[in-house]
Image (cartoon, rainbow, N blue to C red):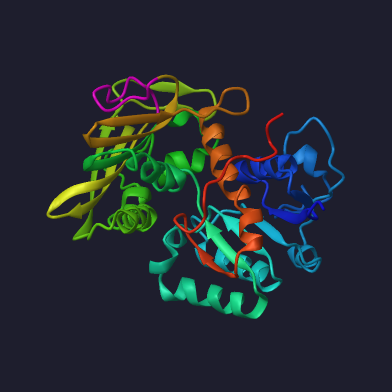
């Protein structure tokens, strides 16, 4: 007997939300049952149009979240932003959990390692689970599978490990997010500008949970988590298709590390190298090809290096990364529906074969 499809709502239709609509529509165990939008201009539009599909799906977007949740969906992909509104996002997620839904999201960084999340974040969600019986799984690509399940999987074929290094190397001209690139990361800003993304403590807040997850899986005792930051200026003005000009003398590249210190040394490292043009900081790590990649390097015996280059939407690497994050989340929904209610992390939730998607 075939199991009934899982009614799934997508909340938000930005870069992640559009990919989530496509992923839910493609998943053989799920049925798209609703789309929640924040903009009144999107309300009433068909989900297929919002997702950039070449077909309509017969699901009209709604800006009334309460009404959509009142239909008691079994799952919600929460794709609204949580970077600058984490407590509002947590409140939204708790509402979905209270109607009994499994919620998957990349939006709240402190919940990637839910066991060590602050009490003010964790306790409202535990209360919602107690009330409604739903669940929550938070993941992405980086932070996400690129620095939890991927390096841990690869570590399983190593004989001896000295350092595990996870890298994201990207040309940010592929990002259709000018506010984040210019303000959050600081591209095009004067060199005395302090990018919020690398303010002291912020990298640890975002990626420290991934360090702790890997250390827990590897049974390694962390001494502490450290941060390093380096910035480079543009030697010439560059013009980008999506975001205009970035002036000579402003920030053109950013590099930082979040280091898990074990036995006094950096042994578990998450590194980001981002540029607004490949001419800036050419001596820093480069992707194997194209605009960007995620890479895992295991220094040890043997030395192992794996690079992942994902593309989507006419070859865009940033869209490809987003699509893999969505694939990890949407692919976990049917497992979570069958699991007990609770808070889950990447070690709890298996990464499984894409059953039924080969066509």
Residue 313, horizontal then vertical, whole percent: 63, 28
Overall secondary structure of the magenta section? loop
**Residue situated in front as seen by the camera: 301 or 347:** 301
Left or right of 20? Residue 295 is left
Figure disc tally: 0
Q: Which residues are magenta?
A: 276-288
Q: Quadrant of the C terminus?
A: top right
Left or right of 41? Residue 326 is left
Residue 190 visible in the current orientation = no
Residue 120, horizontal then vertical, whole percent: 45, 75
**Residue situated in front as seen by the camera: 196 or 245:** 196
**Residue 295 located within the stretch drawn in magenta:** no
Residue 172, horizontal then vertical, whole percent: 44, 32
**In the rendered image of this protein, does residue 292 appear above or below residue 224?**
above
**Residue situated in front as seen by the camera: 2 or 282:** 2
Residue at image coords 69%, 59%: 75
Residue at image coords 60%, 76%: 128
Q: Name, please, the residue furthest toward the right.
A: 58
Residue 181, located in which quarter of the rendered image? top left
Left or right of 86? Residue 270 is left
């Amino acid at each position: 007997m075939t199991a009934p499809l899982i009614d799934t709502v997508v909340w938000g239709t930005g870069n992640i939300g559009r990919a989530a609509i496509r992923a839910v529509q493609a998943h053989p165990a799920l049925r798209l049952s609703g789309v929640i939008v924040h903009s009144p201009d999107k309300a009433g539009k068909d989900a297929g149009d919002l997702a950039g599909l070449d077909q309509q799906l017969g699901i009209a977007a709604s800006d009334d979240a309460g009404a959509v949740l009142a239909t008691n969906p079994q799952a919600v992909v929460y794709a609204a932003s949580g970077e600058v509104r984490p407590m509002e996002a947590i409140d939204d997620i708790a509402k979905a959990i209270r109607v009994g839904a499994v919620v998957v999201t990349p939006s709240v960084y402190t919940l990637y390692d839910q066991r060590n999340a602050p009490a003010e974040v964790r306790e409202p969600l535990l209360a919602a689970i107690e009330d409604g019986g739903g669940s929550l799984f938070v993941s992405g690509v980086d932070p996400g599978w690129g620095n939890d399940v991927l390096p841990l999987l690869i570590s399983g074929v190593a004989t001896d490990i000295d350092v595990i290094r996870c890298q994201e190397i990207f040309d940010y001209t592929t990002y259709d997010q000018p506010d984040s690139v210019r303000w959050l990361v600081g591209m095009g800003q004067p060199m005395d500008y302090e990018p919020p993304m690398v303010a002291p403590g912020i990298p640890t807040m975002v990626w420290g949970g991934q360090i702790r997850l890997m250390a827990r899986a590897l049974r390694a005792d962390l001494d502490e988590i450290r941060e390093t930051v380096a910035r480079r200026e543009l030697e010439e003005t560059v013009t980008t298709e999506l975001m205009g000009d970035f002036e000579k003398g402003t920030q053109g590249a950013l590099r930082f590390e979040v280091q898990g210190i074990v036995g006094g040394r950096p042994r578990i490292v998450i590194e980001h190298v981002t540029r607004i043009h490949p001419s800036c900081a050419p001596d820093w790590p480069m992707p194997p090809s194209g605009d960007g990649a995620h890479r895992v390097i295991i220094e040890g015996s043997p030395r192992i290096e794996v690079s992942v280059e994902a593309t989507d939407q006419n070859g865009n690497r940033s869209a490809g990364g987003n699509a893999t994050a969505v694939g990890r989340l949407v692919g976990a929904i049917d497992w979570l529906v069958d699991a007990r209610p609770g808070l889950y992390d990447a070690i709890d939730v298996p990464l499984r074969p894409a059953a039924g998607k080969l066509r």
